[in-house]
Amino acid sequence: MIHGKKQIFLFLLCVVNIFLVFKIFDDDSGLPVYKDLKIKIDGVQEKIDDVDLRNRQISSEIRILKKNDQYVNRLIKRELFYVADNELMYILK
């Protein structure tokens, strides 16, 4: 009797293993889906890294703008074409 129970148990384990092998290669939930998700995750992580780098650059520029008045004046002159009363600006095209 014990020998028969072992065979049934072994048969059930084999059925479960076959099912799991099919699930690994299933197009809806297996390895192909994992690979696609991995590619998407890598792409999103790259975008996150780019945004994080840009965020650090902007934070650094904000700190400089708060502390350095000369830098602010140069930036205003360059970006907004501001000219002080005692200055002349020549625009060459």
Image: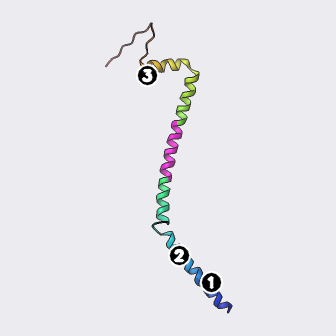
Query: Which residue in the rendered view is the most extreme toward the front?
Result: 28
Q: Is residue 45 above or below residue 81?
A: below
- Pinpoint residue 20: horizontal percent, then vertical percent: 54, 73
Q: CA distance from mark 2 to mark 1?
A: 15 Å
Secondary structure under badge 3? helix
Checking the image for residue 19, the label placed there is 2
* Position of residue 83 in the picture relative to residue 5 (left or right): left
- The earlier-in-sequence mark between 2 and 1 is 1
Q: Position of residue 32 (x, y in %)?
A: 46, 64
Residue at left offset 50%, top offset 41%: 50
- Label 1 is placed on what type of residue? Phe
Q: Quadrant of the C terminus?
A: top left
Would you place residue 47 above or below residue 59 in this image?
below
Q: Quadrant of the N terminus?
A: bottom right
The range drawn in magenta is 41-54
* Residue hosting label 1: 9
Taking 23 as reference, is 1 left or right?
right
> At numbered mark 1, what does the secondary structure look like: helix, strand or loop?
helix
Mark 2 secondary-structure assignment: helix
Which residue in the structure is indicated by mark 3?
79
User: Do the numbered discs 2 and 1 sit on residues whose CB atoms are within 8 Å?
Assistant: no
**Image point 62% across, 84% down: which residue?**
9
